[in-house]
Amino acid sequence: MQSFLEPGMLVRHPEQADWGLGQVQSVVGARITVNFEHAGKVVIDLRHIALVPVTG
């Protein structure tokens, strides 16, 4: 699980490139809420999807 993710971090979904850049809104256990540019707010289970952190 990606316990290093925290609110404010920028991420991308590895299988949904068309969602665009996402910003982590909240992390509760294995569930993370991310606000994506083109998909809006999405709740993701980190036990099934490994989000890709965006730096710089």
Image (cartoon, helix red, strand yellow):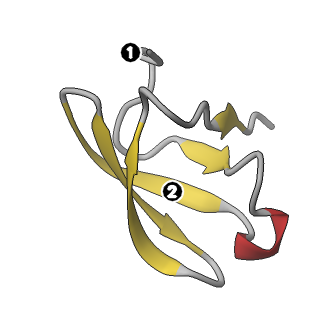
- On the rendered image, what quadrant is the N terminus found in? top left
Residue 50 in the figure: left or right of residue 20: left
Residue 53 in the figure: left or right of residue 26: right
Q: Residue at x 70, y 62 (%)?
A: 21
Q: Residues within 10 Å of mark 1 (few under 14, many from 20)?
A: few
Camera-side residue: 42 or 21? Answer: 42
Rendered image: mark on residue 23: 2
Q: Amino acid at mark 2?
A: Gln
Q: Is residue 29 above or below residue 54?
A: above
Rendered image: mark on residue 43: none
Secondary-structure class at tag 2: strand
Q: Amino acid at mark 1?
A: Ser
Q: Is residue 31 above or below residue 50?
A: below
Which residue is tagged 1? 3
x%, y% of residue 24? 42, 50
Secondary-structure class at tag 1: loop
Q: Residue at x 73, y 39 (%)?
A: 54
Q: Is residue 4 above or below residue 25?
A: above
